[in-house]
Structures are given as structure tokens and as C-alpha cells.
């Protein structure tokens, strides 16, 4: 295949990537955007494999069948609640691939290459550095999301100094790789130190900040892929990696704003303030009021405006479909129902939007935090399902709290707040929530899906 045709194909793939990203910005066009991005990637991979004549057509076909089967099985088997872990793993795989491809290119380049050596070695060093940080950082993020690693922030004395020293060592090793590509130990030393750095950069990040970390690691994987594009002199890989890196960085900035975090602090693994704060006994003792589904149904009977606040607990219990049924039932009785969406609710960016879209909840009913917060004093009932830190008023009142300054959904300003939770256990931030003990709060202890279904049944009987 001629170089002109290949570049035309790469251009078409790049256009599909850009259109795919545009489609992903809106729930109505997200599926189409995803398909366009996948089609672009398929074209790019196919063109690369055929043009370079690395493997036979039979092997390409076999790879398509195996890869397609694995992808289909993942799509079928993976639950929505497991998507954050899967995304973290995908980011890590991208980083690992960058490390291995760069390492292979380094060994090959020692015997001669078509691209200038200085360009190649710089790209190899950057790929190895970012790829290793991405891989190990993603594994830590996966472990925290999966519960294999303590989700709380991990701190020890002198952590920032050690990170700085490791950063300097990686720069020195990068220079060594560029100056003497034949010294393979310098490259693998760079990968080793960057691996330690990747672990230490993510370990201090608590579970509450995990959506930010996932977005940042996604950006890292894109940057590593872009560097790999320079290693392989592959234009479409440079474009794709740059798009992923830039979009991931923009998303990280949005997440940081939603968490009141500094981007530089997240980049360098600096924690939010951690204070002792009052104990759960001090906050809850004798103040928490529980309610049954039938009692809450009576509240809904008198309500004119209801706000539903989804959280990770809704995802765990797969309650999105019963929630949509509850909203439809209320709306059939003339109640205005809205969904208050916190940008970092759940465990990855857009987690709640995806869940609700799965239940065919109209996009118009989803309200951003800033939009709905202004009107919470007009809401009769705020129904919180499995959310914790994103509705904790401590963020506004305690500057020593791990979530201090984080913008929250102001459900405490509603006339009545109903919280569905299995228990009074804390969220990712590991702190008690005074919301549960407010005078206008009622707790419904139990599985989110069952509680919502019971409320629907009670409403129909009322």
C-alpha cells in the first residue's frame, strides 16, 4: 500500500477520533461517538499492520477475532459498578505497552534506525518514564477501587522529599538514555525508578479523590502513547495519544475544580488536609431518625418538587432502573423530579450520568451541581441514594476535614432529606456525615434497590 493511501487512511481515522470525542460530550450522541472512535482505531491498527508487513493477513485476522471476542466478553460480563476498575486497568495496560514498545525500539535502534537517534532516544526515554508511572499508578488505583489496597491516603514522613529525589533520578537516567542508547541498564533503571514514583504518587491519594486520579492516569496513558508515536514514527499514534492526553488533562482540571483540589497537588501526590474531627458517636449519638418506605411514600404524596441525588451505593445495588420507575410514578402525579449530579459522584468521571442513561433517564432531568444548588431551598424532598462525601456539609464548615472546601450538593437545605444507606459507615473520605443527624433528615437503612422498590410499592398503594 502506498504511503499516500496510508496517510489518507490515517487522516480519516484521526477525523473519526475527533468526531468521536465530540459525540462523547453528550449522552444522546455518546454511543455514536464511541462507535466512531472504535472505527477510527480499527482503521488505524489495520493500516499500520498491513503497511508495515510485520505479520501475515492470517495473523491479523486471528488477532481481530481474539481481540473482538475478549472485548465482547468484557462488555457482557463487566458490571457497571466495575467500570472504574476496568478503566484503571486499561490505563495501566496502555502504560505497560508504551514501556515495552519503547524498550524494543531502543534495542533495535542500537543496530541503526531511519529516524535521527537523538529524537528516537528522547522519545524512548519519555515513553518509558511516563509509561512506567502510568502502569504502576494505575495498578495502585485499581487496588484501591477494588478494595485490594487500603483506600485511605497513605502517608509517611518525608514522602514529598523522596518523590522529589526520585524525580531528579529519573531526569538523570533520562539524560543517560539519550546520551548512551547502548546502555540498556540506564533505560530499565529509568523504568524501575519511574515505577516506584508511580506508586508513591498515587498512594497518598485517598479514595474520595479517585475520580481525579483516574482522569489523570488516562491523560498519562495518552501522553505515553503520543511519545510512542514518535518512537515508531507513526503519525496517527501521535495524534491519538495527543487527543487522549489533552482531553484527559482537561477532564482532570474539571475534576480538580469539582473537588476544590489543585492540579499541581494531584500531579505531585500532595494530600488534602487531614484532621481528626469528631467521632461517629459524637456526630450521630441519639440524633439519627430512621424511616420506613411507607413513611417516605407519605412525604412524596405531599411533595411538589423532588431531587434525587445518586451515588456509588446506587450503582452497587443496581438501583438505577427502580429509581427511574419511582421518578416516572412521581411525575405521573404532577411532581417535578430532577437528578442532582455531583461531578465526582461514584468512582470515575461521569459515572452517575452513564448509570442513569442506562435506565433511559432523560438528559434534561440531570442537573449540574451548580445549577441545582441555587434552588435546593425550594425542594420538598431530597432523596440521597448511596452518596456520602458529596453531600457532607462538613466540606463547608471544617477546614481541617479531608474534604474541606470541596463543593457539595446542598441537600441539607431541602425541606426534608431522605438518605438510603446500608449503615452509617463513612464514605471514601472516612469521616462521619452530620447530614444524617440533622433535624430535617431521615435515614432508610437497607439495600438501595430494595428500598426504592418498596417505596414504589408503597406509593402505588397510597
Image: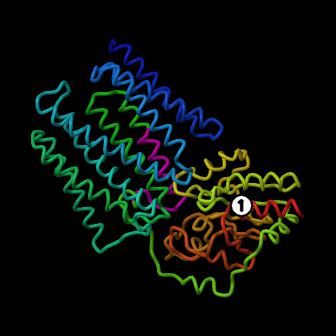
Q: Residue at x 30, y 38 (%)?
A: 227
Q: Which of 160 and 295 is in front in this view?
A: 295
Q: Indicate the quadrant where residue 340 lies.
A: bottom right
Residue 95: x %, y % from top left: 33, 45
Q: Which residue is drawn at 54% across and 35% down?
A: 34
In the image, taking residue 9 as reference, residue 339 lies left or right, namely: right
- The vertical placement of 312 against 290, above or below, is above
Describe the element under mark 1 as helix, strand or loop: loop
Confirm whether the magenta stretch covers residue 129. Answer: no
Quarter of the image with the C terminus is: bottom right
In the image, taking residue 451 as reference, residue 313 lies left or right, namely: left
Which residue has dot 1 on it? 374
Residue 331: x %, y % from top left: 84, 53
Residue 338: x %, y % from top left: 74, 54
**Colour convention of the picture:** rainbow
Residue 348: x %, y % from top left: 52, 53
Q: Which secondary structure dominates the residues rendered in magenta? A: helix
Q: Which of 207 and 277 is in front in this view?
A: 207
- The vertical placement of 177 against 299, above or below, is above
The residue stretch that appears in magenta:
244-264
Q: Indicate the quadrant where residue 444 lies.
A: bottom right
Q: Which residue is drawn at 66% across and 45% down?
A: 357
* Label 1: few (<14), some (14–19) or many (≥20) C-alpha neighbours in 10 Å: few
Q: Indicate the quadrant where residue 295 lies.
A: bottom right
Q: Which of 257 and 224 is in front in this view?
A: 224
In the image, taking residue 319 as reference, residue 2 lies left or right, namely: left
Q: Residue at x 57, y 71 (%)?
A: 395
Quarter of the image with the N terminus is: top left
Amino acid at each position: 500500500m502506498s504511503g499516500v493511501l496510508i496517510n489518507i487512511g490515517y487522516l480519516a481515522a484521526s477525523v473519526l477520533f475527533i468526531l468521536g470525542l465530540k459525540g462523547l460530550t453528550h449522552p444522546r450522541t455518546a454511543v455514536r461517538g464511541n462507535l466512531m472512535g472504535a472505527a477510527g482505531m480499527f482503521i488505524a491498527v489495520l493500516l499500520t499492520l498491513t503497511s508495515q508487513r510485520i505479520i501475515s493477513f492470517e495473523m491479523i485476522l486471528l488477532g481481530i477475532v481474539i481481540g473482538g471476542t475478549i472485548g465482547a466478553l468484557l462488555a457482557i460480563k463487566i458490571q457497571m459498578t466495575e467500570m472504574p476498575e476496568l478503566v484503571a486497568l486499561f490505563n495501566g495496560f496502555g502504560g505497560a505497552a508504551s514501556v515495552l514498545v519503547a524498550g524494543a525500539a531502543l534495542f533495535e535502534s542500537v543496530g541503526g534506525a531511519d529516524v535521527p537517534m537523538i529524537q528516537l532516544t528522547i522519545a524512548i526515554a519519555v515513553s518509558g518514564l511516563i509509561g512506567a508511572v502510568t502502569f504502576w499508578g494505575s495498578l495502585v488505583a485499581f487496588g484501591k477501587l477494588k478494595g485490594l489496597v487500603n483506600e485511605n491516603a497513605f502517608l509517611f514522613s518525608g514522602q514529598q522529599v523522596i518523590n522529589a529525589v526520585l524525580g531528579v533520578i529519573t531526569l538523570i537516567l533520562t539524560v543517560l538514555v539519550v546520551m548512551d542508547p547502548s546502555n540498556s541498564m540506564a533505560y530499565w533503571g529509568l523504568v524501575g525508578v519511574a515505577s516506584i514514583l508511580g506508586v508513591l504518587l498515587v498512594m497518598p491519594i485517598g479514595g474520595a479523590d479517585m475520580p481525579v486520579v483516574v482522569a489523570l492516569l488516562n491523560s498519562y496513558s495518552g501522553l505515553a502513547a503520543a511519545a510512542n508515536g514518535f518512537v515508531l514514527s507513526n503519525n496517527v499514534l501521535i495524534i491519538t495519544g495527543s487527543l487522549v492526553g489533552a482531553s484527559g488533562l482537561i477532564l482532570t482540571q474539571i475534576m480538580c475544580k469539582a473537588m476544590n483540589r489543585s492540579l499541581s497537588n494531584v500531579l505531585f501526590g500532595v494530600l488534602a488536609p487531614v484532621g481528626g474531627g469528631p467521632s461517629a458517636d459524637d456526630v450521630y449519638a441519639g440524633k439519627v431518625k430512621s424511616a420506613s418506605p411507607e413513611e417516605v411514600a407519605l412525604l412524596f404524596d405531599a411533595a411538589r418538587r423532588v431531587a434525587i441525588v445518586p451515588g456509588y451505593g446506587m450503582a452497587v445495588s443496581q438501583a438505577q432502573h427502580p429509581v427511574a420507575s419511582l421518578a416516572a410514578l412521581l411525575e405521573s402525579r404532577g411532581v417535578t423530579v430532577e437528578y442532582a449530579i455531583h461531578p465526582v459522584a461514584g468512582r470515575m468521571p461521569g459515572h452517575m450520568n452513564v448509570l442513569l442513561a442506562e435506565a433511559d433517564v432523560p438528559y434534561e432531568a440531570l442537573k449540574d451541581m451548580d445549577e441545582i444548588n441555587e434552588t435546593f431551598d425550594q425542594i420538598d424532598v431530597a432523596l440521597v441514594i448511596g452518596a456520602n462525601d458529596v453531600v457532607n456539609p462538613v466540606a463547608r464548615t471544617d477546614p481541617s476535614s479531608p474534604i474541606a472546601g470541596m463543593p457539595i450538593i446542598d441537600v441539607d437545605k431541602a425541606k426534608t432529606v431522605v438518605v438510603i444507606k446500608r449503615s452509617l459507615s463513612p464514605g471514601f473520605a472516612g469521616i462521619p456525615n452530620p447530614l444524617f443527624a440533622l433535624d430535617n433528615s431521615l435515614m432508610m437503612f437497607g439495600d438501595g434497590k430494595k428500598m426504592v422498590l418498596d417505596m414504589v410499592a408503597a406509593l402505588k398503594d397510597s
